[in-house]
Amino acid sequence: MEDLASKPLIDPEIPNKLYFRIGEVAKLAGIKPYVLRFWESEFNGLGPKKSGTGHRLYRRKDVELVLEIKRLLYEKRFTIEGARKILESKPKRGESASKPTAARSRREQGELFSGAPAFYQELRKELADLLTLLQD
């Protein structure tokens, strides 16, 4: 039996197709189809559509994810749990790299009033006093 870890891991060129069947994805990734089916149950982002006949149809983004999972597991030697955490921490396409946190949002809201006319400064002071009163 050939050891997968000893093979050099080279990202294959993904053909320009809309959908790939499980055998095609397995061949591209150099793994067995049952491994793909197992990964589907372990990684939330990997969820191929099913055709009317029940065949799995992978999109290009699914194939890219399979190749990334394989890289994390076989090359980087992550556990499945570790690879899952890495993939979940990566920002999705279209999302900004840094999500605003609640503390950051409050700070930005406070900065709205800095340098504002005296009316807003007075209003801010009164609201802060009211908040203090309510918290007591």
Image: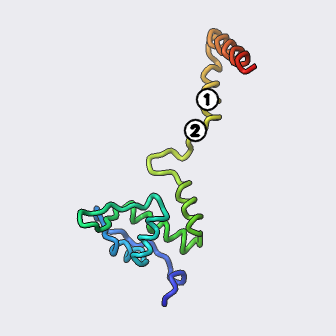
In the image, what residue occupies the spot 55% across and 67% down? 80
Which percent across, then down, holds residue 23? 33, 75
Dot 2: within a 10 Å radius of its alpha carbon, few (fewer than 14), some, or many (20 or more) residues?
A: few
In the image, what residue occupies the spot 54% across and 61% down? 84
In the image, what residue occupies the spot 46% across and 58% down? 44
Q: In which quadrant of the rendered view does residue 67 lie? A: bottom left
The outermost residue toward the left is 52
Which percent across, then down, holds residue 119? 62, 9
SS for callout 2:
loop
Looking at the image, residue 42 sits to the left or right of residue 135; the answer is: left
Q: Say if mark 2 contacts mark 1, CB within 8 Å.
A: yes
Q: In which quadrant of the rendered view does residue 102 lie? A: top right
Q: CA gap, disc 2 to disc 1?
A: 10 Å
Mark sitting on residue 13: none
Q: Up-down: is 5 above or below 69? A: below
Which percent across, then down, holds residue 34? 41, 75
Q: How many marks?
A: 2
* Residue annotated with mark 2: 100
